[in-house]
Image (cartoon, rainbow, N blue to C red):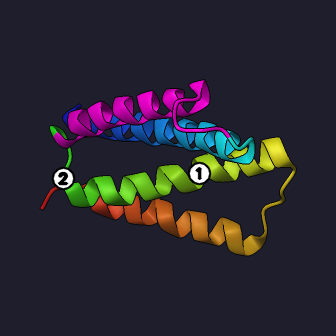
Amino acid sequence: MSLTLGYVFCALATLVIIAGDYFIKLAADQGLTFGAPKVLLACALYAVSAALWFAAMHHITLAQMAVAAAIFTLLALTALGVTAFGESLTARDIIGITLAVGALILMSHRA
């Protein structure tokens, strides 16, 4: 259960970071300054993600977090690209995602 909880916190932190990045990108594209609501929202999201990283570190190792965060980011951004921007998945993309998930499985066991 502890390992699963660590990965849940890691996945949530990753999603919150991606949301923060989204608002930072919107603010930058609109030429907004640091005090703009979108920038402040992004900063708040980054603070929440730090708390989630801290919670994850109580349950999984730093190496496990690094692999999981990379995979969660890959999956979330792939899903966003396909659903929001109409991007397609190539065979190479699918193989890469499969290998990344395989790495997570290998790293999920404590030494």
Badge 1 density bin: few <14, some 14–19, many ≥20, Cα 10 Å? some
Q: Which is nearer the eye, 88 or 23?
A: 23
Residue type of the residue flagged with mark 2: Thr
Task: Residue at 74% x, 41% y: name it.
Answer: 30
On the image, numbered disc 1 is attached to which residue? 75
Label 1 sits on a secondary structure element that is helix
Q: Position of residue 101 (x, y in %)?
A: 48, 59
Magenta range: 32-57
Pick the quarter of the image with the C terminus.
Answer: bottom left
Q: CA distance from mark 2 to mark 1?
A: 21 Å
Task: Residue at 69% x, 68% y: name it.
Answer: 93
Label 2 sits on a secondary structure element that is loop
Q: Say if residue 47 shows up in the picture.
A: yes
Task: Residue at 80% x, 42% y: name it.
Answer: 83
Give the left or right position of residue 75, taking residue 40 as reference: right
Q: Which is nearer the eye, 104 or 13?
A: 13
Pick the quarter of the image with the N terminus.
Answer: top left
Residue type of the residue flagged with mark 1: Leu
On the image, numbered disc 2 is attached to which residue? 61
Whether residues under marks 2 and 1 lie with C-beta atoms below 8 angstroms apart, the answer is no
